[in-house]
Amino acid sequence: MGKDKLKRFAEVATFSNVVQLDAGIPYKGNWAKDFFKNDNPLVLELACGKGEYTVNLARLFPSRNFIGIDYKGNRIWRGAKDALEEGVTNVGFLRIQIETILDYFAPDEIDEIWITFPDPQPQISREKKRLTSPRFLEKYKILLKPSGYVNLKTDDDGLHAYTSEKIEELGLNLHVRTEDLYNSDHADEVLSIKTYYEKKYLQHNKNINYLKFSFK
């Protein structure tokens, strides 16, 4: 592991807005009250990477709480550091494997979920690792309030098509679907947040797909 990664791992462990996977489960069912010290809605970004989307959402919506989840602490470091330096207090980060998410949040605790540019896991043998596979969708259904939504933003046409199929197969409620977000009527200030990688995709004229769906 490089010196920069080691430095970031050490530094992120000291950040007040990061909960490490070895910290136990102190906030399950009480993230808003105990971690954010309020009773505002709670929004998750899964596989948040450097946390760009998480932090930008927190800037746009100061009356909501946002948690970016990723396993790699050296990635989380960037978003967590930016939030601390800017004084963005309605954002936090949780370093866990997403497979264990039910251990860290209570049923009906989450108001909305964002999945932005995840690994599409294109191999058939890795379907269960896709963040919109049925086994993950079942977890989200438990965590989300009845009024909650899942948002998927991806450059991968295959993952978009796969998720659309699962929404139909499972009888979920589809609210928005587009294969070309920025040439649609849906590109508001939220969906127009662009991460580093999305900007690279757009430079190569890659279309951006978006889905919004719910379980109720």
Image (cartoon, rainbow, N blue to C red):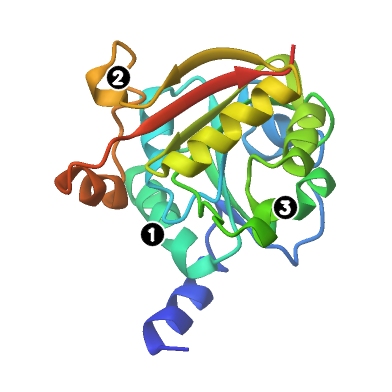
Q: The disc labelled 3 sits on which kind of residue?
A: Lys
Task: Give the residue displayed 30% in from the left and 52% down from the top.
Answer: 197
Can residue 96 be seen? no
Q: How far apart are marks 3 and 1 (CA)?
A: 29 Å
| Residue bearing mark 3 | 128
Residue 160 image point, x, y percent = 49, 35
To which quarter of the image does residue 75 belong? bottom left
Task: Give the residue displayed 56% in from the left and 56% down from the top.
Answer: 121
Q: How many numbered dots are placed on residues in this image? A: 3
| Residue bearing mark 2 | 187
- SS assignment at label 1: helix
Q: The disc labelled 1 sits on which kind of residue?
A: Arg
Q: Distance between the residues labelled 2 and 3?
A: 30 Å
Q: Is residue 14 left or right of residue 102?
A: left
Task: Tell us which disc is closer to us: 2 or 3.
Answer: 3
Earlier sequence position, callout 3 versus callout 1: 1
- SS assignment at label 2: loop
Residue 204 image point, x, y percent = 17, 48
Earlier sequence position, callout 2 versus callout 1: 1
| Residue bearing mark 1 | 78
Label 3: few (<14), some (14–19) or many (≥20) C-alpha neighbours in 10 Å? few
- SS assignment at label 3: helix
